[in-house]
Amino acid sequence: MPEVLKAPLVVEFPFTRSLGPVQSAFLTGLRERVVLGVRTGDGRVLVPPVEYDPVTAEELRDLVEVAPTGTVTTWAWNPAPRRGQPLTTPFAWVLVRLDGADTALLHALDAPGPAAVHTGMPVRIRWAGERTGAITDIACFEPYDGHRAEPTGHTGEFEDPVTGIVAAARLDYTYSPGRAQTAYINALSGRRTVGERCPSCRKVYVPPRGACPTCGIATSEQVEVGPRGTVTTFCIVNIKAKNLDIEVPYVYAHIALDGAGLALHGRIGGIPYDEVRMGLRVEPVWTEGARYPDHYRPTGEPDADYDTYKELL
């Protein structure tokens, strides 16, 4: 059996969100070294603030400044910080109830070791040198034995408020396609498309999954399909994707390769986007050194009859 492939994979995208008046004031306040909470109808002060009371669902707008000093309510030691965490050296994750608040804020505590951390210890905010209006404007908390700070009475009104943030979502992991898809990928390197046939229903799955999802039976019989196929369904893409050098509009389609019992997807080229249609016969176009077809183009054959691909829609 050939060696099963594996490779590091990163999934990453920036998520852009707008801020309501409460979150806008909170993050703008951090930029200005001011911590704001919000007061509920029963007088509790919530930090971080929320826009609706978690108990009554009442809309909350009464902003209240709290102190940059507080007390650790609980903690956990982090001996091996990961990429993107607040500190690069070992630190404690802590919940800190800031003076004037009734709830706790999660952040990092810079401490020399777990023996130096305890519930009830006084701490204060260490502000970041450069602040942009994000939770990272609090660089971390640090132990503090001085006088408790007093709020200045800030109203929550700021010039040039922060109105939106970009949160980067990222997942790093090692992906292994398994035996069946390893064979599929290896075949693509030779510009061949290989699926696997279910021994019960006889359907050929491309890409192969190692088992039939309908019958629940393992598959091992390899079947070469294509290279030509039929467009079953498609969509016209009008929004240009970041880092994708393809001019819009273009067509992305499900393509049932000849001999396959499942349609795969690919881009359609070599034809005006408004002439692509269901039943269009296509073939793959490869570029030098590519691991998979760059796109599919019309073969010039007559369109396939609907009955030949209706089960693959």
Image (cartoon, rainbow, N blue to C red):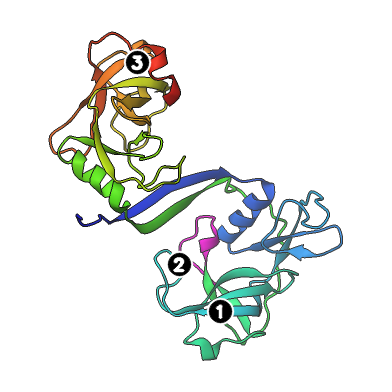
The mark nearer the N terminus, 2 or 3, is 2
Left or right of 107 in this view: 300: left
Q: In the rendered image, which quarter is residue 191 located in? A: top left
Q: Amino acid at mark 2?
A: Gln
Q: Nearer the viewer, mark 3 or mark 1?
A: 3
Q: Are marks 1 and 2 in contact (CB under 8 Å)?
A: no
Q: Which residues are the magenta region? A: 126-138
At horizontal 41% and vertical 46% (from top left) the residue drawn is: 217
Q: Residue 246: x and y, percent?
A: 30, 28
Q: Secondary structure at mark 1?
A: strand
- Pointer 1: what residue? 76
Give the secondary structure at mark 2.
Answer: loop
Residue 261 is drawn in which quadrant?
A: top left
Hey, which residue is sitting farthest right in the picture?
42
Question: Toward the viewer: 236 or 248?
Answer: 236
- Coordinates of residue 249 in the picture (x, y in percent): 37, 20
Q: Which residue is mark 2?
A: 85
Q: Residues within 10 Å of mark 1 (few under 14, many from 20)?
A: some
Alpha carbons under labels 2 and 3: distance apart: 46 Å
Residue 3 rendering spot, x and y as whole percentages = 21, 57
Q: CA distance from mark 3 to mark 1?
A: 57 Å
Question: In front: mark 1 or mark 2?
Answer: 1
Mark number for residue 273?
A: 3
In this picture, residue 167 sits left or right of residue 240: right
